Image: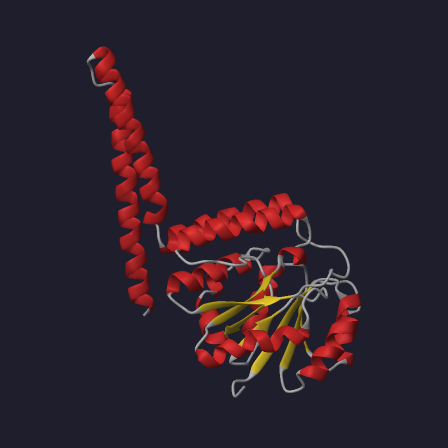
Amino acid sequence: MSEKLSIVLPSKNEGKSLELLLPKLKSCYSSAEIIVIDDGSDDNTGVLCADHAVTHVRHTYSKGNGAAIKSGARAATGDIIVFMDADGQHNPEDIPKLLEPFKNGADMVIGARKASGQASVARLFANSLYNRLASLLVGHRIEDLTSGFRAVRRELFLEFLHLLPNGFSYPTTITMCFFRAGYTVLYTPIETAKRIGRSHINLLRDGARFLIIIFKIATLYSPLKLFLPISLVHFTVASGYYFYTYTMFGRFTNMSALLFVASILIFLIGLVSEQITALLYKNRD
């Protein structure tokens, strides 16, 4: 490729994996900028980076996977950044699969894992749920919302840096942001291996965060997609309850009035939010 390539690896105590991964990356992509973001590790990560002559950016304490990604994006100088996990799950030989679509105008290419590549049945179920929910909200098919193996144009990625959380929800946020901004997001199938070492993801805690992030980005870029259905539910319940009380008792109750008012207020909030996001986009442009 004519564009300069940066490869960013967020890492926290992944020394055992980096011993195998860094030589392979240096061998296959000698002209690429390789950056290891050391998120407060207490192992030999720094020594390994020095031994293999790769850029080492260290956090003095653990800030989170998302914070490491942001540090990597700021440190990278390439036109295209490849983000990949440092735990041995992602195969460096799959990087050309991510880069090929950029020749045809892609803005971000995500490595989509197969069902067999999920860490557990619970993870598979959770990721399938996230994919369907996010697809509904953004209006596009999302094949793998939480994949950490992706390539992206650096200048576009930096536009959304302030929105990215410091935890493990960065793939969720950046994927939905790119879709809502109208950038071209493509997927390519990849194979994943079993990680080396212990996972830092807590299924319940981080799963709840993923759901919150999905709704947060949806309300930021398309508020009516959330507010309108909620408003319609209130209106339907109000109409049904009014029909029941009118036919049974011949009167209009306070509860029906409250539900109708709530329906109107929720719709108006969504409408105003939609106008605000439109103004924000206008200012950004």
Q: Position of residue 46 (x, y in %)?
A: 75, 72
Q: Is residue 198 above or below residue 82?
A: above
Q: Position of residue 117 (x, y in %)?
A: 66, 58
Q: Residue at x 79, y 65 (%)?
A: 43
Q: Position of residue 14 (x, y in %)?
A: 75, 64
Q: Residue furthest top?
A: 249
Q: Residue at x 67, y 86 (%)?
A: 30
Residue 206 seen in this snapshot: no
> In which quadrant of the rendered view does residue 111 lie?
bottom right
> In which quadrant of the rendered view does residue 231 lie?
top left
Q: Is residue 236 above or below residue 126?
A: above
Q: Residue at x 45, y 54 (%)?
A: 135
Visual colour scheme? secondary structure
Q: Is residue 154 left or right of residue 281?
A: right
Q: Is residue 162 left or right of residue 58?
A: left
Residue 42 seen in this snapshot: yes
Q: Position of residue 218 (x, y in %)?
A: 41, 52
> In which quadrant of the rendered view does residue 282 lie?
bottom left
Depth check, front residue: 101 or 232: 101
Q: Residue at x 74, y 73 (%)?
A: 21
